[in-house]
Amino acid sequence: MAEETLQSEKQISPENTESPVKSKSPLTIIREWPLSRKIALAALTIISACVFGLLIYQGRTADYQLLYANLAEADAAPVVTWLKTQNISYKLENNGRNIWIPSHLIHETRLNLASNGLPTGGAVGFEIFDKQSFALTDYVQKVNYMRAMQGELARTIMTLAPVENARVHLALPEKRLFKDQQKQPSASVILSLAPGQSLDTKQVKGIIHLVAGSVTGLTQENITVVDSNGVVLDPGENRDDQILSVDMLEYQQEVENRLEMRAQSLLDKTMGTDNAMVRVSATLDFSQIEKTQELFDAEEPVIRSEQISTEQSGMATSGGIPGVQSNLQGTTPLQGGENGSSSSTRTTNYEISKTVSKIVNPVGTIQKLSVSILVADTVTPATDETPAQITPRTDEELASIRSMIAAALGLLPDRGDQISVISMPFTTTPEDALLAQQEPEKLIYQYMPLIKTGLIAVGLLLVYFLLIRPIIRTMRGDIQEHYKTVEELERERLALEKEQLLDEETEEEDILDPVVTLRKETIADPTPAAHILKSWLREA
C-alpha cells in the first residue's frame, strides 16, 4: 500500500505542477447550487427588480411639482403653449386645470411666466395698453381703461385664500358740467369661493374698501358683493350691536385666559404639571357711563361782583388875586367857601362755590369673578409589599391653595367673588393620540431626495448581502479547493474511500440480516405489515 500511495503521489504531482487549475464561471457556480439556493436567488432577483422599478417610478413622479392649480381653460391654454415652446415637460391633472412640471424648474418657470403676464387670471389688466395703435378713438380708450380696472381688481381679489375666482363690473358715468347732473359710480363683485371656504364679515368689508379705494368717487354704499350662488354678502355695517357683542366676547375670553394662566403657573410650580386645572368665569361691565357732577359749597361764599359809587352835590369857590402872581409857585392862594353835599354807595354780590366734574367710567370693568380649581389627589407610589394608593388632599392643603389663588387673582368677597377648590383623581389620556397631526404635503417634496437616497442605499445593501456576497463566498471556496496541496487531496480521497467502504459494509450486513431488512421495509411502507397483523388477529 505504501508503494501504491507513493506512485499515486508521483502521478498526481506532475499534473498539479504542470497544469494550473481553471476558475469556474458564475453561471457554472450557479448551476452547481442546490435547488433551494436557486429559488432564493430567483426570488431575490424579482424583489430587487420590483424595488428598483418602484424607486425609478417614484423618482419620476416625485420630481414633478404643482405649478398652478384650478386654472381656467383660458388661463391654462397659454401656459401650456409657453411650456411647449420652452421644451419643458409637464403633466395635466384635474381635467387640465392643474399643471405639474419638474420640481427643479418650478421657481424659474413661475418667474418667467410672470414676466410674460401669465396666467392672466381670466381677465385683462393694464397690459392692454402695452400695444397701442394711433387709430384708437377716445371711446375705445375709455373702454380699455375700464376693462383694465376690472381685470386688475379681479386679480387682486383672487389673491385672497378663500377666493378661487372673481369678476368685477364697474359702472363709471361720464362727467357732467353741473354737479346736480353728475351720477355716482357703482360696482359689483362676483366671487367664486374654494370648496369648504367662506368669507367672514371682515373679509367682505375689506373687499368693499379695496374696490372703493381703487375707483375715484366710488363709495362703499354703491358696491355689491355676491357669491357664486347669488347670495349677497353683507359686510354688516348696520349691525354695530352684533359686532360690539363679538368684540365684548373676545375681550371677556382674553381676560379669563389671562387670569387662568396666572393661577395655572402658580399651581404648576407648587404641585407639578398636569396636577391641577383652573377655570375662571368673569362678569364684565360693558356699559358706557358718562357722568357730569356739580357740587355747591354754601359755607364758603365767593364774591362774584362788587360795585362802588360816589355822589357829590353843590359848588366850591376859591379866593385870591387873579393874575400872574396867584399862579406863581410858592404863593398860597386864599381859600374860598364851600356850598353842597356828597354820598358813597357800595354793592357786593356773593355766589355759592360750585365744582363741576365730568366722569367717564371705563368699559369692560370686572364686576364679579368665579374661580374653580380642580386638584389631583395625592398618589403614593407602589412598593413591593403595598400597591399604589390614591389619597384625597387634606382640608389644610385645599385652604392654602384657596388663599393663594384668591390673593393672586385679587378676589374681593365684598364684590361677590367666589372660589372653589376640589380634590379628585385624574384620568390619564394618551397624549400622542390627542396631539397627532397630519404633516403638510410640502414636507414630502422637501424630504423626497433624502428618502430616495435612503431607499437606493437599502436596495444596494440587500443586493450585496443576499446576492453578491454568497457568490463571492462560493467562488472563494472553489479557489481554495483548487489551491490545495497533493497531500490534502490524497487525504480527502482516502477519507472518501473509507466512507464508501463503511457504507458498503453496513449495506451488506443489513442485507444478510432479515430482521433489519424487514424493519426497513416496514418503516418505508407500513401498509402491508398492517394488513398482515390484521389477518393474524382474525385467525387468532
Image (cartoon, grey):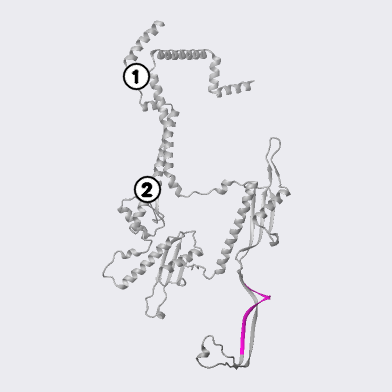
Q: Residue at x 37, y 19 (%)?
A: 482
Say which mark, if any, is on residue 104: 2
- Residue 373 drawn at (x, y percent): 67, 53
Q: Residue at x 44, y 28 (%)?
A: 35
Asked whether the viewer can see residue 50, the reply is: no
Residue carrying label 1: 21
Rounded to the nearest angstrom, the CA distance separating label 1 from label 2 is 56 Å
Query: Which is more toward the observer, 305 or 411?
Result: 305
Which residues fall within the magenta stretch? 292-311
Q: Residues within 10 Å of mark 2 (few under 14, many from 20)?
A: few
Q: Quadrant of residue 20?
A: top left
Residue 53 or residue 265, whichever sits in front: 265
Vertical relation: 171 (above or below) 18: below
SS state under label 1: loop
Based on the picture, tell me whether residue 303 belongs to the magenta stretch. Answer: yes
- Our reading of the magenta stretch's main secondary structure is strand
In the rendered view, tell whether residue 57 sits above or below residue 149: above
Residue for point 36% across, 49% down: 105
Q: Which mark is residue 434?
A: none
**Disc nearest the viewer among 1 and 2:** 2
Quadrant location, the C terminus: top right
Q: Quadrant of residue 16?
A: top left
Q: Residues within 10 Å of mark 1 (few under 14, many from 20)?
A: few
Q: Is residue 324 left or right of residue 174?
A: right
